[in-house]
Amino acid sequence: MEAVETLINLGSNLNDRDNDGYSPLHVATRMRNTGIVQILLNANANCNITDDNGLTSLHMAASQGCKGILESIIDYCPDIINKQCNIGNTPLHLACQNNQMDTIEILLKKKADINCLNLKLQTPIHIAAEMGHTDVCKLLLAAGANIEQREKGGRTPLYIAARGSFTAIVDMIIKTARLGCPDSTVNDEDGLVRKKFNEPRWSTISTNCAAVINDHIRSILWKLAYKHLENGDWKKLALHWSFTHEQIQAIEHQYDGPSSYKEHGHRMLMIWTSSLSPDTQVHEQLYQALCAIDKKNTADSIRKKYEEKYQEEKKNFGSKSCHQCLVS
């Protein structure tokens, strides 16, 4: 650091570039030397200089997870936060690619463009989904990432996650897409009456967006999927609940085999519950849906088991606490 200060005082060029296009600020960032970066910034080093790949020192700091350097550069030169390199990637793209959670949080707080497109028409969530970075995808979804954007090949983040067999990311994206309010009903191309949803409510997403269900309801959903639904029934339920064909295909992609539909059905049911408000009567919604797909006997059986459980809990704990527990 003393040598750097001495050279600056002697008139060294702060913005000279080496054979790779690196400025001293690039080199200090690459070496993760926060102190020298601060000295260079205090001496008015140019943050806009790019290397031969179009990368600024901010790109480097973001990709390496250098939080202190990242914040210093943004504070000194905030207008480069969305600067794109030669292939269109912003610092946020690179932070997502390298699974740098702390860096991503800083960039989002500093108003980085979460839906900026690179030359392949990829947003940061396309890259995070392709890399299988679950926590990054969760953070981007909560911040309002566009899950409908298609890259040059026509692939959405959901399709990319499904092809990569990243089940947790697939489920999160579908849950996010379903966090909308019922708008009206429409006739599906399969002849089923479906609820139509408005645009996703990004602001409602949290780390625990699933509706609260107790162990009894959870058990009912498991038994329904593995014991009662026949092959194809889960898709009918999904369509009734306004799952899109792309969402259904993404769920179905994960497992293969003669009994895989049971796992698909269970995943779909758990995703469905996540779009319900905590005060929803899950068993009643389930009853209506099963009747709608001509599974009334199964619906009656579930209702009977629920009522039996309700009466049992009512006897043991009192009607008020029981009802609140079972309906939650």
Image (cartoon, rainbow, N blue to C red):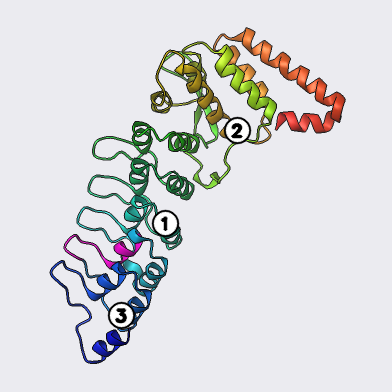
User: Looking at this view, is 125 or 162 the one in front?
Assistant: 162
Tag 2: Cα neighbours inside 10 Å, few (<14), some, or many (≥20)? many
User: Looking at this view, is 190 or 326 the one in front?
Assistant: 326
* Residue picked out by circle 2: 276
* Residue picked out by circle 3: 40
Could you tell me which secondary element the residue under label 3 belongs to? helix
Tag 3: Cα neighbours inside 10 Å, few (<14), some, or many (≥20)? many
- Look at the image and tell me in which quarter the N terminus lies: bottom left
Q: Position of residue 192 (x, y in %)?
A: 48, 15
Which amino acid type is marked by label 1? Ile
Of the image marks 1 and 2, the number of the one nearer the N terminus: 1
Tag 1: Cα neighbours inside 10 Å, few (<14), some, or many (≥20)? many
Which picture quadrant has residue 153?
top left
Residue 104, which numbered label? 1
Residue found 76% across the figure and 33% down from its top: 324
Q: Which span of residues is magenta-colored?
A: 51-62
User: Looking at this view, is 285 or 318 the one in front?
Assistant: 318
**Is residue 275 at least partly visible in the picture?**
no
Which amino acid type is marked by label 2? Leu
Could you tell me which secondary element the residue under label 1 belongs to? helix
Could you tell me which secondary element the residue under label 2 belongs to? loop
